Image (cartoon, rainbow, N blue to C red):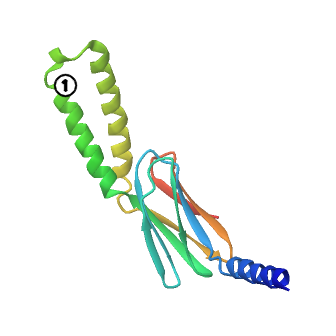
Amino acid sequence: MRRQWTRSLLVVLAGSLLAGCAPTVSVVNHTKVGVTAIISGKGVREAFSPTPGESSTGDVKPGAFSVYVSPSQDWINHADDTKNFLYNQLLDPSKLTPAQVKDIHKKLEDLHNAMQQVEGNRLGEGCAGMAEEDGSYTATVVLDGEGRLKVTCK
């Protein structure tokens, strides 16, 4: 009798867990810049900051949802601080080896290119979709051939 009661309880608990799963939206950042992503839907609004090459996931309710992505102000501030630090290192090149100077120039060039991409994307980009119960959706963030943010929801 006790075994049957335990088995029944496990079936009820498992069914409750499966029935209670909300749809999820993952924002995948395939760019070289940090972004801020806002996921909105029925009664839901969450903000995430997936770093380059990373993703963040949030729950939504069944129905329409949207994802809006723009360059992260934290990333912009960090890039500015890094640029200033690297420029300051070049103020006294006698303390640096030729390899260090070359490395700093390369880092500054990469940072400059990434910051130029950010400048053209201040307004951001978005996509939308329809979430079904227990569904899993992805908003993929990339830069197009002209360096503009593009977001696709699937």
Quadrant occupied by the C terminus: bottom right
Q: Answer with the quarter of the image where residue 116 lies.
A: top left
Q: Position of residue 126 (x, y in %)?
A: 49, 66
Outermost residue toward the front?
2
Name the secondary structure under disc 1.
helix
Q: Can see residue 133?
A: no
Residue at figure coordinates x 36%, y 57% from the top left: 72
Identify the image quadrant of the N terminus. Answer: bottom right
Left or right: residue 23 compared with residue 7: left
Q: Is residue 41 above or below residue 82?
A: below
Query: Horizontally, is 90 left or right of 138 in the view?
Result: left
Expressed as whole percent of the image width and height from the top left, the position of residue 60 reads 56, 76
| Residue type, numbered disc 1 | Leu
Front in this rendered view, residue 15 or 126 = 15
For image coordinates 19% across by 27% down, the residue present is 89
Percent across and percent down for residue 24 are 60, 70
> Going by the image, does 101 lie left or right of 136?
left
Q: Is residue 97 above or below residue 13?
A: above
